[in-house]
Image (cartoon, helix red, strand yellow):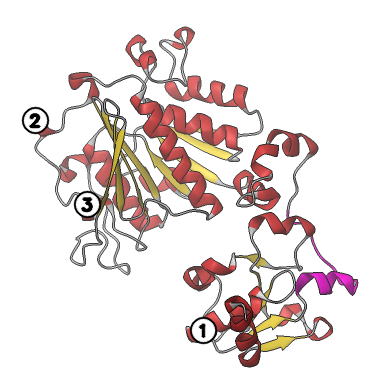
Amino acid sequence: MDPYRRMLLAARDRITEVEPAEASLDSWVVIDVREPHELDVGLLPGARTIPWRRLAERIGELADPDTPILLYCAVGERSAVAAVILEDRGYEKVASLAGGIKRWMAEGRPTVSSTRLTLDQRHRYARHMVLPQVGAAGQQRLIESRVAIIGAGGLGSPAAMYLAAAGVGTLGIIDDDRVDLSNLQRQILHRTADIGLAKTDSGGTTITQLNPSVAVIAHKARVTAENAEELLAGFDVVVDGTDNLPTRYLLNDVSLRLRFPIVHGSVFRFEGQVSVFHPYVGPCYRCLFPEPPPPELAPNCAETGVFGVLPGVIGTMQATETLKLLLDIGTPLIGRLLTYDALEQTTLEVRFPKDPHCRSCSDPANPPELRSEQEYC
């Protein structure tokens, strides 16, 4: 017998199945465990969506072990297996909807649309929506997402443009600098005519021209201990496009306080690095770099130079990681530092663990207090 079929039969012997006629949805936390591309046919009213393979790691976001949970899929098979997975993790009130949503709909029971995409949006994002890992529901999720980009320079430029093109609904652009002629070798958000303009103004115009439906929240400011929480509250992901160590350590501590993941990128001459720091899920920036190096060992690109296309490569990787986080697909670079050598066209992955004694992230109940930039380095 097929191993999956054997697992399914064993699951149905163990779990509770609820008939559609007996499923009072108000009595349950209802979770759709189908893949994103399957959601176009509709959802049960009030349902939340978590693909069944990710259910174990994400169920804590929606329910406690004593919460009544009703799982469903297309025909009731994957939801039965998912119910066993939850029961094995201590969830005692779990049931699977018999026959899944197909039977539910065949009996004429109500569903709601998984998306609110317009015809223009369906056309613009058509190449996304044919991907099984995205679909219409995933695209709707991107449209409803909020991403902050710290720095509208070499890294922030490609990240902002690809996130806008992908349809991320709200982009926060935070930068206190103005466009200079020397920026144009790599900062593709800006044009020669923009020299002298605030980068937030120039970048916002470029984003709007690329995708008018993206809302741009521009802050002509530098992120400091005094304003960081106010500037970054409410964002789902923060892209770190900064070029100085004090701000990176500050962002690390803000993320631990507000619980948003940081997609990190850095460049130096011909080499770049990318990683994801997800608060209390994986290691933080200080787990990787417990203390900053001396200033003479951390020069900026104005002092050492940077290969013009390199920020484009790294910033695009940051956009990739951001979209993966928003869509909950793939394997993010959590606990992994990806290094890229432009001269040799090689990459190297370095895995690093969570430091149990990290002074920033070792105690989730006591996130770090924010300090002035000078105190970080």
Q: Residue most toward the front?
A: 1
Mark 2 secondary-structure assignment = helix
As shown in the figure, which amino acid type bears the numbered disc 1?
A: Pro
Q: Nearer the viewer, residue 80 or 169?
A: 80
Residue range in magenta is 100-114
> Residue placed at 43% from the left, 19% from the top?
198
Disc 3 crowd, CA 10 A, few/some/many (<14, 14-19, 20+)? some
Residue 9: x and y in percent read 65, 86
Q: Is 107 inside the magenta-drawn segment?
A: yes
Q: Quadrant of residue 341?
A: top left
Q: Residue most toward the top?
A: 193
Residue 20: x and y in percent read 81, 81
As shown in the figure, which amino acid type bears the numbered disc 2?
A: Glu
Q: Residue most toward the bottom?
A: 13
> Residue placed at 9% from the left, 30% from the top?
296
Q: Nearer the viewer, mark 2 or mark 3?
A: 3
Residue 314: image tag: none
Q: Nearer the viewer, residue 322 or 342?
A: 342
Q: Which residue is mark 2?
A: 296
Q: Quadrant of the C terminus?
A: top left
- Vertical relation: 285 (above or below) 163: below
Q: Quadrant of the N terminus?
A: bottom right
Residue 352 visible in the shown view: yes
Q: CA distance from mark 1 to mark 2?
A: 52 Å
| Residue 179 relative to residue 224: left or right | right
* First in sequence: mark 3 vs mark 1: 1
> Residue placed at 63% from the left, 68% from the top?
33
Residue 65: image tag: 1
Q: Which residue is mark 3?
A: 288
Counting labels gives 3
